């Protein structure tokens, strides 16, 4: 295969424990451009891959704070500045009445921030990825577990990386074309 068309190698495992052990050994061996695929979330896989904590909670907090401030400011502007009505001598700025709408707008913008940040940070929608070119990869959503090593990894060598993945107990090692 022409190396310019090679994305990397992908190894298939039958059990989740095998995948977790393979990911840990791969990181210990020095590979860093790796990814793992499983049909369901595996506890400890993110740590084994060396992924940083997700920044999504910070975006949710920012959206919630912006929603609370915006909701409160919107009501304050409407009742105190734009259209003040003095009914029965009540104060124009009656903050207890602002709480329900402030809370609702806070939840709304926090939820929007969560959905949008998940899509943006994960690069979604992603209609194409090179691993989709491997015919066996369709089992990743059913009952198989996969570990891929990209060609861009500094330690990548086609023959030695293939031998390394086979020594990890992979049932099959395939080349991934671009």
Image (spheres, rainbow, N blue to C red):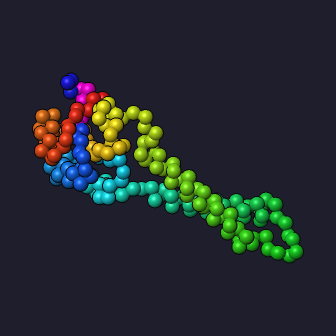
User: Relative to 164, does residue 25 appear above or below in the rendering?
Assistant: below
Judged from this view, the residue extending furthest toward the right is 88
Q: Quadrant of the C terminus?
A: top left
Give the residue at x 58% y 56%.
109
Give the residue at x 34% y 34%.
132
Give the image location of residue 42, x and y in percent.
Answer: 32, 55
Q: Quadrant of the N terminus?
A: top left
Q: Is residue 116 visible?
A: yes
Judged from this view, the residue extending furthest toward the bottom is 89
Pick the front one: 16 or 83: 16
Left or right side of 55 for 4: left
- State which region is magenta: 4-9
**In the figure, residue 43 lies in which quadrant?**
bottom left
**In the figure, residue 160 lies in which quadrant?**
top left
Left or right side of 61 for 77: right
Give the residue at x 42% y 42%.
123
Residue 32 lies in magenta, yes or no? Answer: no
Pick the front one: 50 or 41: 41
Query: What secondary structure prevails in the magenta region?
Result: strand
């Amino acid at each position: 295969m022409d190396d310019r068309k090679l994305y990397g190698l992908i190894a298939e495992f039958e059990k989740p424990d095998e995948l977790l052990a393979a990911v840990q050994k791969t990181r210990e061996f020095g590979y860093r451009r790796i990814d793992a695929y499983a049909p369901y979330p595996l506890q400890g896989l993110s740590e084994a891959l060396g992924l940083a904590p997700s920044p999504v909670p910070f975006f949710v907090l920012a959206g919630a704070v912006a929603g609370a401030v915006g909701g409160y400011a919107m009501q304050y502007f409407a009742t105190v500045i734009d259209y003040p009505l003095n009914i029965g001598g009540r104060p124009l700025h009656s903050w207890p009445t602002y709480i329900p709408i402030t809370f609702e707008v806070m939840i709304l913008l926090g939820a929007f921030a969560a959905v949008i940040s998940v899509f943006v940070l994960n690069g979604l929608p992603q209609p194409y990825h090179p691993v989709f070119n491997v015919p066996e990869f369709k089992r990743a959503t059913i009952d198989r577990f996969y570990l891929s090593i990209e060609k861009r990894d500094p330690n990548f060598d086609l023959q030695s990386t293939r031998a390394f993945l086979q020594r990890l107990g992979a049932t099959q090692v395939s080349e991934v074309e671009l």
